[in-house]
Image: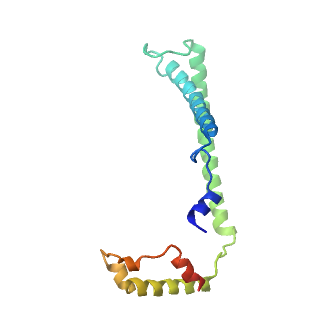
Amino acid sequence: MEKKDVMKQYVTDKYFSKGHWWTKLWQTLVAIITWICVAVPVYWTISSTLLANNPQFIHAWKYEEGKTLFYFFDRFFIIAFILIAIVVIVSTIHNNHRVKQHISKERQYNEDQLDIRKRQLNNFYTQRFGQATFRQHVKHYTVDPEQNLDVNEIHRLYED
């Protein structure tokens, strides 16, 4: 199977593929609206609290109750952030422990077949490009056109 066929089979994204103009338009519009929904409340809050004394900014509110509410939520969000961080860290440590200690570890490949393939590949490289010590220590090597690998040459080597 060619690489392009594999990519088509497993990787699909209508946004970046040719055509699909309605998908591109819709996803771009949704992304812009979503970022506006993020930016407006942030600007609204910062301009009316931290930049309240700066006349260059348009302030969403100027009354004291809004500032009091903001600073109340400020404490709430700091406490919530600390609690959430603790829960996430403890959960991560617990999950890592569970994965390392309790989940069975099995090799998903045949080790004997892997050793055979490694030897075949090493012999192939030795015939084509020279001894392993030479290949590992050479700093510059020019490949002759006859030495270039065909697209499926390694795959055919493994099939033998």
Residue occupying image coordinates x 60% and y 28%: 37
* Quadrant location of the C terminus in the rendered image: bottom right
* Residue 70 drawn above or below residue 128: above
Residue occupying image coordinates x 57% and y 82%: 158
Name the image colouring. rainbow
* Quadrant location of the N terminus in the rendered image: bottom right
In this view, the residue farthest toward the left is 140
Q: Is residue 134 left or right of residue 6?
A: left
* Residue 139 drawn above or below residue 63: below
Q: Horizontal and vertical percent for residue 97? A: 64, 63
Q: Horizontal and vertical percent for residue 21? A: 61, 38
* Residue 37 drawn above or below residue 130: above
Residue occupying image coordinates x 65% and y 53%: 91
The residue closer to the viewer here, 143 or 46, is: 143
Residue occupying image coordinates x 62% and y 46%: 14
Q: Horizontal and vertical percent for residue 134? A: 34, 83
Q: Is residue 122 left or right of residue 30?
A: left
The answer to which quarter of the image holds residue 85 is top right
The residue closer to the viewer here, 3 or 95, is: 3
Q: Horizontal and vertical percent for residue 110? A: 64, 81
- Total number of numbered discs in the rendering: 0
